[in-house]
Image (tube, rainbow, N blue to C red):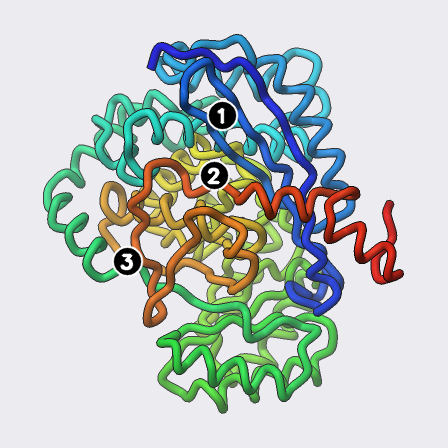
Amino acid sequence: MDCQIIACSVRDIRFPTSIGLHGSDAMNKQPDYSCSFVELKTDSQYIGNGFTFTVGRGNEIVCCAVEALSKLVVGTKVKDIFNDFSSFWRRLTSEDQMRWIGPEKGVIHIATAAIVNALWDIWAKIEGKPLWKLITDMEPEKLVSTIDFRYIRDVLAPGEAVEILKKMRNGKTKREEYILREGYPAYTTSCGWLGYPDEKIRQLCKEALAKGFTQFKVKVGSNIDDDIRRCQIVREEIGAENILMTDANQKWEVQESIDWMKKLAKFKPIWIEEPTSPDDVIGHSTISKALKSYNIGVATGEQCQNRILFKQFLQMGAMQFCQIDACRLGGVNENLAVILMAAKFDVPVCPHAGGVGLCELVQHLSIFDYICVSGKIRVIEYVDHLHEHFKEPVVIRNGYYQIPVAAGYSSDMKEESLNQYEYPNGTIWQELSTAGVAKKD
């Protein structure tokens, strides 16, 4: 572990998912799923990979932010980082000039996530463990030492976090054995993209059922009549016994959210995801209270900027399902903080996934949550896109994530894919540009 980081590189990787309207929702109608892909080289055999997720244009801005932050990483010994990770994390998020363009939110924060995720990938590779195993094997005090508790001590102090972890030691081995044997349940969003025609939705539901999925999410929010029709289609296909979720991707005003969901309540969705602005804590609280009698919870967190906003959502009863994101927050460290806070408020953690590599990352966090924090099986989002570009892609069997065993954070992408999809000069983008299908920005 006595190696030094000698280089940090970042590549703008984009996939033309807009062509098939994959990932389309009420707010993001034609996304090109993308990532800012980071490689941290050391003076040893270890290389750490990490990334953050975007939906196309603007990915180059995140890459610029990574380059700006890289000066704080290159030249550092990894043991110095891992021996006091919370201080190093604060150094990244509180650089006295770059902090101004955050702080701890927006482009600069998701760029931080890409670097931090790469650091955890190095640590897990050095220890020869998958990320989930690295953090579940840590002593509580060591794990808690990686978290920056600034601004959340009024809700969760370090000593309290240690006690949560120590309390859950009982039965830990059995839970690990169980999850390795059974896997972790997934819900699918791949059937319900807003841009898909009705016939495709029906067919995809049938295919997902045949693969063992029992939980389905539908994108809503553009037209109430369309939403009623599409929810009806999905409910007809999946039956009354299976679970339905809905997702508005921040489209509505507060009262509009309540009124719209009352009309969809007959389809018995268990949650409405991101009904309004991701920053509106009081608005989400109002919606939560109004929909409680309809047995519809509010799920949010996909674009929740940091642990401080999560703290407020939990304090206000503004989320019934906590949707951490492996790349929106500042990497593993900040996600650990939110998982522990959610446990204190007894709010289930059901991560946002999909995108580019998000499924690969969040599976590790949910496994940790089950083994070490909540002791309860929740559910992870699954989207059947772009996994083929990863060296260790997620494996879904009978609607369950299979537990990763390779050392690292499952974040290594294939060199061939990086070369094909690097924007704008990768071979795929050159071909699309020549054919007039895609234009360079």
Alpha carbon distance from label 3 to label 2:
22 Å
| Count of residue discs | 3
Mark 2 falls on what kind of element?
Answer: helix
- The reply to whether residue 293 is visible in this rendering is no
Residue occupying the point 63% across, 88% down: 199
Under mark 1, the amino acid is Tyr
Residue 337, placed above or below residue 343? above
Residue beneath disc 1? 151
Check disc 1: other Cα within 10 Å, few if <14, some if 14-19, many if 20+: few
Q: Earlier in the sequence, mark 3 or mark 1?
A: 1
Q: Decide: marks 1, 2 in contact (CB < 8 A)?
A: yes
Q: Which mark is residue 22?
A: none
Looking at the rendered image, the quarter that the N terminus falls into is top left
Q: Decide: marks 3, 2 in contact (CB < 8 A)?
A: no
Indicate the position of residue 170 as horizontal and vertical percent values. Answer: 10, 42
Residue 153 relative to residue 249: left or right: left
Q: Which mark is residue 377?
A: 3
Q: Who is closer to the viewer here, 212 or 351?
A: 212
Residue at far bottom of view: 236
| Mark closer to the observer (3, 2) | 3
Check disc 3: other Cα within 10 Å, few if <14, some if 14-19, many if 20+: some
Q: Earlier in the sequence, mark 1 or mark 2?
A: 1
Residue beneath disc 2? 311
